Image (cartoon, rainbow, N blue to C red):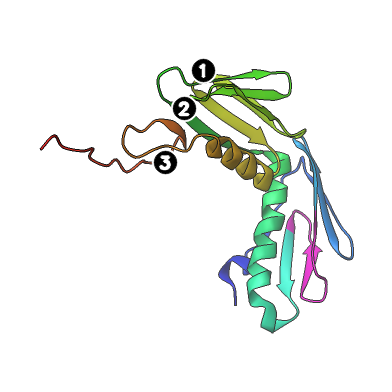
């Protein structure tokens, strides 16, 4: 049995959860999210202030732990939200937010403009530190990966966009021998 799947999901007081035949909907202070699930494999039951996911088809055990964690991410997302922090390293590299656009100057001949998705907010500190906030963990991670993809960090000088908790393995350059 999945150890993660067996854990009950605690629901905060400010979050309301609605479970139907094939969907789970959660509404809280940070927004509203929903997730579809296969009712032939698992069943989701709501108690007083917790949600319990149980397995119906023992052959699909991997789906059991996955769905429990996805439902937990919905509940945490609408109550607290998720964020990812990125750093920009390089001379003249900077970022700024104009309305619902993120503008990156990362060494190209033109600035890179990215449209910020509706449910996300991006904040820029000191022109080089980005923070992506939002209730949907998948969307926060995907948009952060798209930002990093514009100029991934290179191993010789460390220039580029990296996650704040990421370490870049540096290589030694050429020697003059």
- Say which residue label 3 marks: 166
Point out the tag, 2 or 1, that comes first from the N-terminus.
2
Which quadrant of the rendered structure holds the N terminus? Answer: bottom right
- Disc 2 residue crowd, few under 14, some 14–19, many 20+, Cα 10 Å: many
- Please state which of residues 26 and 142 is positioned toward the viewer in this rendering: 142
- Is 174 on the left-hand or right-hand side of 39? left
Instruction: Describe the element under mark 2 as helix, strand or loop.
Output: strand
Q: Which residue does the image show at 54% across and 22% down from the upper left?
A: 109
- Say which residue label 2 marks: 88
- Is 171 on the left-hand or right-hand side of 84? left
Q: CA distance from mark 1 to mark 3?
A: 19 Å
Residue 40 belongs to the span the image colors magenta: yes
Q: Position of residue 27 (x, y in %)?
A: 81, 43
- Please state which of residues 84 and 175 is positioned toward the viewer in this rendering: 175
Quadrant of the image occupied by residue 15: top right
Say the numbered circle drawn on residue 127: 1
Q: CA distance from mark 3 to mark 2?
A: 12 Å
Q: Is residue 104 above or below residue 72?
A: above
- Residue sticking out furthest to the front: 177
Q: CA distance from mark 2 to mark 1?
A: 8 Å
Name the front one of labels 3 and 2.
2
- Please state which of residues 118 and 67 is positioned toward the viewer in this rendering: 118
């Amino acid at each position: 049995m999945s150890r993660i799947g067996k854990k009950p999901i605690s629901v905060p007081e400010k979050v309301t959860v609605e479970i139907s035949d094939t969907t789970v909907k959660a509404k809280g202070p940070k927004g509203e999210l929903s997730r579809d699930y296969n009712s032939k494999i698992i069943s989701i039951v709501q108690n007083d202030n917790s949600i319990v996911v149980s397995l119906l088809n023992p052959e699909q055990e991997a789906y059991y732990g996955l769905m429990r964690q996805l439902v937990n991410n919905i509940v945490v997302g609408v109550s607290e939200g998720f964020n990812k922090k990125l750093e920009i390293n390089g001379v003249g590299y900077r970022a700024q937010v104009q309305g619902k656009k993120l503008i990156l100057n990362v060494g190209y001949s033109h600035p890179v403009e990215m449209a910020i998705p509706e449910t996300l907010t991006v904040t820029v500190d000191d022109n080089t530190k980005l923070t992506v906030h939002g209730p949907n963990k998948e969307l926060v991670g995907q948009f952060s990966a798209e930002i990093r993809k514009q100029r991934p960090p290179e191993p010789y000088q460390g220039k580029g966009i990296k996650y704040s908790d990421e370490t870049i393995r540096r290589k030694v350059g050429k020697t003059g021998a």
